[in-house]
Image: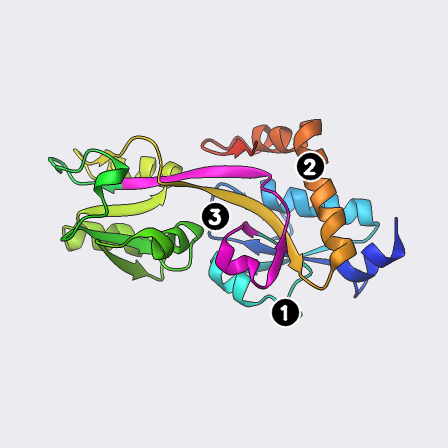
Amino acid sequence: MDRQIVAELAPKGVLRAGINMGNFLLVTGKTAAGDPAGVAPDMAAEIARRLGVPVAYVPFERPSKLADAAGTDAWDIGLIGAEPQRAAKIAFTSAYCEIEATYLVPKDSPIAGVADVDRPGVRITVRRGAAYDLWLERNIREATVLRSDSADGPFDQFVAEKLEAYASLKPALLKDREKLPGSKILPGNFMTVQQAIGTEKKNTAGAAFLADFVAEAKKSGLVAQLIEKHHVQGLSVAP
């Protein structure tokens, strides 16, 4: 292994991997030792193995906090959705997997498709700082976006305030729909969250190594194997 790559990605002799604990598709549980378990932790562990160093997981409750910690020496690689706002500080690989994001609407809602949501008078609730929230921030022009900091906050607000739309990952909406009889998930998606691996922009050799790793992990079937290993529904290997 090239010493420069190891020096950039594991300067302390261990690969510190920032993990978004709020993504239940990529982190599906914990190990007996208390470490996060799932597709994202396994990807990080495989990178560490190839670098020849141990892995240490650095958990974050949501992706915005992980992204905000870029440049603070809190982590060496971060596994989160690649969004333009985050790419200002982080060098991302291509996506290794993707997740559809769409809307849940109430029973008897006149909204029939995702293109109908951005209208005056429509209130959308979303979890603050998620990749799909960043998309809404860039693209919603007429509707009002309301943000919540907790994982359950958007759904609770959607129900309590009788809002017109609730934006989230499709697998999460499938679960929430069961708690609200008659509600419906809009077909298709307004975006797909591109889950990638990032490092500081100064780590040019490390970033190139990570890009090659992700390309090979998709081509070899490693990503698909990890999705199957953890029995994840709603997660797809990125093209």
Task: Establish if 219 lies above or below 142.
Answer: above
The region drawn magenta spans: 80-103
Residue 161 part of the magenta segment:
no
Q: Name the kind of residue labelled 2 in the image.
A: Ala
* Residue hosting label 2: 215
Task: Report whether 11 appears left or right of 57.
Answer: right
Q: Earlier in the sequence, mark 3 or mark 1?
A: 3
**Farthest residue, direction bottom:** 72
How far apart marks 2 and 1 lie (CA) works out to: 25 Å
How far apart marks 3 and 1 lie (CA) works out to: 22 Å
Q: Earlier in the sequence, mark 2 or mark 3?
A: 3
Between label 3 and label 1, give the one nearer the viewer: 1
* Residue hosting label 1: 71
| Residue 189 in sight in this render | yes
Q: Name the kind of residue labelled 3 in the image.
A: Asn
| Residue 151 in sight in this render | no
| Residue 196: percent from left, percent from top | 59, 46
- Secondary structure of the residue carrying tag 2 is helix
| Residue 195: percent from left, percent from top | 54, 44
Residue at the location (44% across, 52% down)? 131
* Residue hosting label 3: 23
- Secondary structure of the residue carrying tag 1 is loop
Q: Nearer the viewer, residue 84 or 1?
A: 84
Query: Badge 2: few (under 14), some or many (20 or more) residues near its Cα, within 10 Å?
Result: some
